[in-house]
Image: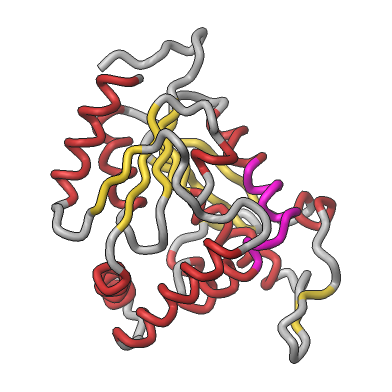
């Protein structure tokens, strides 16, 4: 496949879909095979949530309301740094690279709640676009095709049943030593689906010209090969 050179328009492939549909795994494989920057928007949102909590910029009352009010100024002053790499991005908090600490169930749910807020979505979108300006990229998220990169050359919507997605997420947690039950993870998946599809700003939805790929009964290699085939045809 021929990708655009640095003096031409960058190629952008977007992969949207609900939690646990396989977006990050698929994106990593495609990025590795095609030499793309992989923009993990979920990691960006998780890092923002982690940084807000760990710098004590947010607390909650008994009704779940956030205070003080989160503004662009608050977000721009967070000690976060994002570096674009072929196949990934690296995220630093106070100079230390973030990894498993942003992948806990607690941070997942905190992220799901905070990502409803427009200042946070606008800030995360700006970060993604800045990273994509560095070179051709593959982006996963909830609104990558509908809001962040509406002119992407290929838009994919990955999906799978809640039970399949919960099983995948459970295995991911177990591999990191997180002790949770299937029922807890399934509840988390369903709650995140509700949060993502019902939020006021940029809810999860299928882009008008997206290709829908159900990964429930497909292997990662089958999904990756199919998307690469589409990219060769469209990008």
Question: Residue at point 32% right, 21% down?
Answer: 234
In the foreground, 109 or 196? 196
Majority secondary structure of the magenta segment?
A: helix
Q: Where in the figure is residue 211, as x and y percent of width and height?
A: 33, 38
In the foreground, 159 or 6? 159
Magenta residues? 114-125
In the foreground, 11 or 176? 11
| Image quadrant where one finds the C terminus | top left
Q: Where in the figure is residue 17, as x and y percent of width and height?
A: 40, 53
Q: Is residue 116 magenta?
A: yes
Residue 145 seen by the camera = yes
| Image quadrant where one finds the N terminus | top left
Q: Is residue 23 magenta?
A: no
Residue 37 seen by the camera = no
Q: Is residue 194 left or right of residue 124?
A: left
Q: Is residue 158 left or right of residue 207?
A: left
Quadrant location of residue 120?
Answer: bottom right
Question: Residue at point 55% right, 61% down?
Answer: 46
Question: Residue at point 50% right, 36% down?
Answer: 84
Question: Residue at point 25% right, 52% down?
Answer: 214
Q: Of all residues shown, which one is farthest toward the front?
A: 208
């Amino acid at each position: 496949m021929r990708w655009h050179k640095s003096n031409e328009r960058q190629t952008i492939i977007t992969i949207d879909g609900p939690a646990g549909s396989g977006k990050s795994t698929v994106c990593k494989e495609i990025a590795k095979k095609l030499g793309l920057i992989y923009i993990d928007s979920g990691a960006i949102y998780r890092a923002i949530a982690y940084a807000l909590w760990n710098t004590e910029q947010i607390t909650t009352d008994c009704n779940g309301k956030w205070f003080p009010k989160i503004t662009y100024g608050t977000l721009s002053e967070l000690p976060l740094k994002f570096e674009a790499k072929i196949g990934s991005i690296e995220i630093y908090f106070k100079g230390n690279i973030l990894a498993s600490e942003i992948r806990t169930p607690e941070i997942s749910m905190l992220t799901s709640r905070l990502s409803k807020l427009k200042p946070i979505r606008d800030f995360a979108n700006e970060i993604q676009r800045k990273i994509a300006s560095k070179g051709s990229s593959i982006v996963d998220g909830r609104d990558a095709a509908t809001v962040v990169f509406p002119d992407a050359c290929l838009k994919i919507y990955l999906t799978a049943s809640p039970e399949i997605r919960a099983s995948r997420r459970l295995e991911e947690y177990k591999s990191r030593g997180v002790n949770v039950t299937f029922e807890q993870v399934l509840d988390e998946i369903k709650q995140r689906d509700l949060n993502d599809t019902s939020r006021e700003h940029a809810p999860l939805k299928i882009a008008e010209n997206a290709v829908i790929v159900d990964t429930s009964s497909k292997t990662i290699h089958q999904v990756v090969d199919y998307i690469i085939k589409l990219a060769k045809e469209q990008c």
